[in-house]
Image (spheres, rainbow, N blue to C red):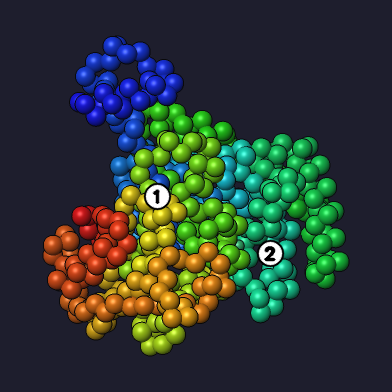
Amino acid sequence: MLLARFIFDNLAANGYNIKVGRLARNDYRKEALFFMSATALIGAQWGDEGKGKTIDILAAKADMVVRAQGGSNAGHTVVYGDSTYKLRLIPSGILYPDTVCVVGNGTVISPAVILKEIDDLTSRGVSMKNLKIDARAHVIIPYHVEIDKLSELARGKEDIGTTKNGIGPCYMDKAERIGIRMCDLIKPDVFREKLKRNIEIKNKIITAVYGGEPVDFESTYKDYCEYAKRLAPFVTDTSVLVYNAIKAGKDVLFEGAQGTLLDLDVGTYPFVTSSHPTAGGFCEGSGIGPTLIDDVIGVGKAYTTRVGKGPFPTELDDETGDYIRRVGAEYGVTTGRARRCGWLDAVILKFSVRVNGLTKLAINKLDTLTGIKTLKICVAYEKNGETVYDFPTDISELEGCKPVYIDMPGWTEDITHAKSFDELPENAKAYIERVEKEVGCPVTMVGVGPDREQNLNR
Ligand code: GDP
Ligand code: IMO
Ligand code: MG
């Protein structure tokens, strides 16, 4: 009651339209819920941590799931029973018929990709009645994809290893203020004018700078007008929807794409994506303020993976790395590329706790480590005889950092049928407890298999 009173007083002091003295006991509870309803879920490593699975589990109780950044570079897997869903732009909450799913203003949308996703899901009986797309989200046009491919080619050995979905070039246009947004796409005249202007510029870049093939205006315009007709009913101001849902005490989940180390600002630049997959990105990307998010859950794997180029201190270029890749099926959902695999890096997870303000960690794929005799956790780096505890800001400093490992004994028992954390072998429990201690953040969920049932709450 005292807590509710404190929260209530704070709400009133911060300008919420509540009259002191007019709330009954139940209303205090409602206000307390108002303060507890928005949870952000973030990839704590380099992506593919099992965010789709964890969101799907949490979405069982959510009223709304929101994507706020990235685009079809993401590939989020949800498994239950014999069904597997691989989602790219549509939030993983879509599998629950009453959950509102928002594709927020910070995302970049390929109309062809999202429509294919809509069609695939619809054909499997998933309803799209609750899908909402923000009018301000930027649209990926074929010239973005072309420039993504050509610029990667031009970088040669220095390439980033992008997913070639046109993500970077689309965010470039957003920053240059020539981007085309969903609100433009659904107005044929406005769209025609903007597309014409952009195609002229982009074709010069494609042909003169990169020696590529120009994008055809008429066919692109025609295709996009068809896409627009189908997407228009979903387009709205989603910032209002998200705000109103939180204000009404509904459970809102923010679904991160990519991962903290792929963040444009704090990640391993330039080997990053072009958006902000960190906690701050949710606010910009969904049009709400930071005080509205209560909990930030980081999702990690019990080891580390990375797709694309860039430094990776705990990478295992040996049989153990191959074993983890094989047992963990570490191949990209979107591109099919083999993921680079390595030991768990607690320096990275600590960094993620700091830059995201993580309140909890979910650790997936503990089962993948079953059968490895001795497991290693990186707790610091060593460089030029010095011990480094903080993740370096510059990749030239990261290069040459050697992991300092602690050894943990492994386990051989099958853990995929465990129903509670206590049922796990002692060594598996000790591994998670050690991670928690090194990282300084409670591990509240542990994944022991891809299915939504294979999750242990702590
Ligand atoms: P996301 O991008 O973070 O959503 O992750 P991906 O879907 O790209 O990759 C995670 C992969 O691991 C998917 O194939 C999931 O089905 C799978 N997965 C998630 N959690 C677990 C787990 O606890 N154990 C196992 N074995 N697989 C898992
Ligand atoms: P989810 O949401 C893993 C990586 C690419 C490349 C870099 C830049 O499934 O975790 P981009 O196409 O974004 O310009 O590529 O970012 N990348 C991901 N890696 N998981 C993802 O998404 C990723 N999205 C982008 O491999 O290194
Ligand atoms: Mg993925």
Residue tagged by mark 2?
A: 148
Mark closer to the observer (1, 2)? 1
In the image, what residue occupies the spot 21% across and 26% down? 2
Q: Nearer the viewer, residue 377 or 32?
A: 377
In the image, what residue occupies the spot 74% across and 58% down? 143
* Mark linked to residue 425: none
Q: Nearer the viewer, residue 118 or 380?
A: 380
Classify mark 2 as within 8 Å of ligand 2 or not, answering yes or no: yes
Q: Nearer the viewer, residue 408 or 342?
A: 408
Q: Nearer the viewer, residue 3 or 183?
A: 3
Mark 2 residue crowding within 10 angstroms, few (<14) / some (14–19) / many (20+): many
Outermost front residue: 385
Residue 378 x/y as whole percent: 35, 74
* Mark linked to residue 357: 1
Q: In what element is the residue under mark 2?
A: helix
Identity of the amino acid at label 1?
Gly
Identity of the amino acid at label 2?
Asp
